[in-house]
Image (cartoon, rainbow, N blue to C red):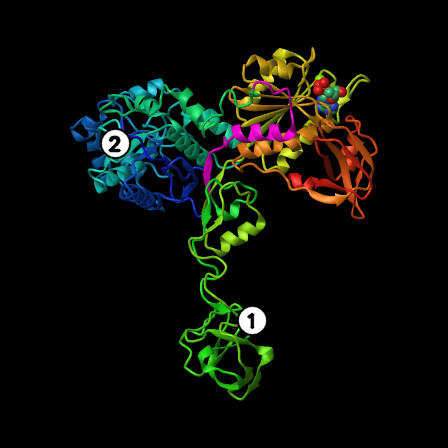
Amino acid sequence: MIPFNTVAMVDWSGGNDTGPTPRKDAIWLGLVRDGVELPPRYLRNRAVAEAALTELIEGECSAGRRLLLGFDFPFGFPKGFAAGLTGCPDPFAVWEWLEARIEDTPRANTRFDLAGEINARFPGTGPFWFNGLKRDIAHLPRQNTRRGHGLPDRRVVENIARGAFTCWQMGGAGAVGGQVLTGLPVLNRLRHRFDGQLAVWPFEPLSSPVAVVEVWPTLINGAVKKASALGGIRDAHQVRLLARAVARLSLDDLSDMLDVSAPEEGWIMGLGHEDKLEKAASGGLHPPPLRDDCFALPAGVDWAPVDEAHELLRGRLGPVTGAVRLAAVQTLGRVLAEPVRAARANPPQPNSAVDGYAFAHSDTGAGAQVLPLAPGRSAAGVPYGAALPGGHALRILTGASLPEGADTVILQEDVTRGEGEIAFRGPVKRGANTREAGEDVAEGAQILPAGRVITPADLALMAATGVGDVTVREALRVAVISTGDELAEAGGPASGHQIYDANRPMLLAMLERFGAVPRDMGRVPDDRAALRAALDKAADGADAILTSGGASAGDEDHVSALLGGTGSRALWRIAIKPGRPLALGLWRGVPVFGLPGNPVAAMVCTLVFARPALGLLAGQGWSLPEPMLLPAGFAKSKKPGRREFLRARLRDGRVEVFASEGSGRISGLSWAEGLVELEDGAREIAPGDAVRYYPYSAFGL
Ligand code: AMP
Ligand code: MG
């Protein structure tokens, strides 16, 4: 099978126009093109939807891309219906029959009358039932009182798809009958319009560029539930996640799902393959997964200096998050997955930088100048609208377009204004007080690189250069687990031998500042089975995991022991203070940063190691903060062999350090406003010597 470049999924609706505001139970379109997810589109009625689908199919076909297009309603009816209605078992005969008869406008449609009309052609009562209207409709029972119509209740596929509604039910929560009667006519028109380019599964071979398939969002109900719990419209999640899931399937899996024979009734694509669809919908690591040995230390490395540890991380980690298209204005704090180019020059036309008078430079010279004023003026947003007559000047305001024929502006303060003329002293520089078209940004120029974290200023730049949509990475989801038998929940009761879990609130908050989505996975005791279960749970739906405590090689250091058991762990003994060994490893493919339990060490290791590593995973590339070289407000004799970080703050231009270096002193973390970094070698620091200071803000806090 030839792969599909674009996957689009439609959540159909048999109801009438739902208004301009996106809402549930309307038509929604989810789309993934070349692996990039577009935001789901709300289509307020079927006419709008049909136009959007026509445009989509035309666009994909003319670009030479293959499109898989899914709809969430049955393409066929239970066996015998097609022949009973049209005299022919061909499902397309039913499509033609329905298209010829239904009347469908954004305000009203005749689906209930049509159901009655069909019932009249079959013996007994039914097969269609449920009338959503006040008036009675001949042959359409309001309740499920059908019998004697001679047709099966369900398609074969619906006997397997647990919870699927039958196409005979015309209304009520979850019913699909109305969608079929309004949807098939639209599909029939698309089929004719794109004759030869579009094939309907499973009735036709899928050799054309466009394949239309029947889908059922319930197959990925787990992923939809999870996403909906975080907010948003369920229908939008359904189409988005279904498109994502199908787009991520391997070609083999997709071929398997399409390998079905159901020539009259049709089939639900993916039925029986829910596990694969759910897995693909839930995301996980879809850029190339990290290598199993990404945290292995090279042979012979015992104590790694900080710089060496950084180089190892930098060389082995890469982005793990997927990409989505978003409106530029919605991207504050997001990471660009692709560079952004200016859609328009800034400024788009030459304009005036001041309030003054515009003229052609060639009409002026040195000494006293007098120019007649052309009537009218050019103001921002209200251009002069004509060419400036030769030898004339024109009143012009800041930001206004220069009229054709003018290339120079003189400041109003430098002019004497008379009756219908101005006087000033020359010479004036050609182009004075004007801005050239594109002098700031040329059309098509790259304005922002991939990996950029979008700032408020970037929003201005993108707006000014006409950028509509951009491709950003999904936010990195980072789970946080605290370990230790001694921990009690902050704010709760604690016995004398317990301490409150201080790391979790700190780490969750730091992650938020880093632009990640933190996930609180709670505390676990020093128990291997409990920790294993917590890591399993965290790995399901997170891109990275931070643990604190239990990271070194003692009896109760279960984090390092468990990661060691996966064969992918490395206990990194880094020459740093504060900070004991850091346990790094992959747990079910998800990188785990096993931080020390001491809050001071946990924070320093997060800032110095986890933060740049998470930046790589999130697609930002590698970046370390720039230190400020500032005079020390303290004296210290530092031993060689390890890098030290001291809790510090800036007062009166000097760097003060916290009175105690004890790594259990949480008060010092809060007292501090940054860290001082003392290099690996020995050093005697006297007050006034330059030291490397990083305000917390340099780490993004
Ligand atoms: P560990 O790395 O598990 O040996 O812990 C080192 C020290 O940090 C011990 O004194 C622990 O009690 C303390 N500690 C561990 N986890 C936390 C936490 N979440 N909050 C506060 N202190 C902790
Ligand atoms: Mg512990």
Q: Secondary structure at mark 1?
A: loop
> In the structure shown, which secondary structural element does the residue marked by tag 2 occupy?
strand
The amino acid pointed to by label 2 is Val
Is disc 1 surrounded by few (<14), some (14 to 19) or many (20+) residues within 10 Å?
Answer: some
Question: Is 177 or 449 nearer to us in this picture?
Answer: 449
Mark positioned earlier in the residue sequence (2 or 1): 2
The reply, left or right, for residue 207 in relation to residue 13 is: left
Residue for point 52% across, 83% down: 366
Camera-nearest residue between 576 and 649: 576
**Residue 200, numbered circle:** 2
Residue type at mark 1: give it: Val
| Residue 336 falls inside the magenta stretch | no
Q: Based on the displayed image, in which of its 4 quarters is residue 593 positioned?
A: top right
Please indicate whether residue 648 sits to the left or right of residue 470 in the image. right
Picture quadrant of residue 640 = top right
Q: Nearer the viewer, residue 426 or 261?
A: 426
Residue position for label 1: 354
Bounds of the magenta segment: 299-325
Mark 2: C-beta under 8 Å from nearest atom of ligand 1? no
Q: Is residue 505 visible?
A: no
Residue at position x 38%, y 26% in the image: 249
* Quarter that holds the N terminus: top left
Q: Position of residue 243 (x, y in %)?
A: 39, 33
60 over 293 or under it: above or below:
below
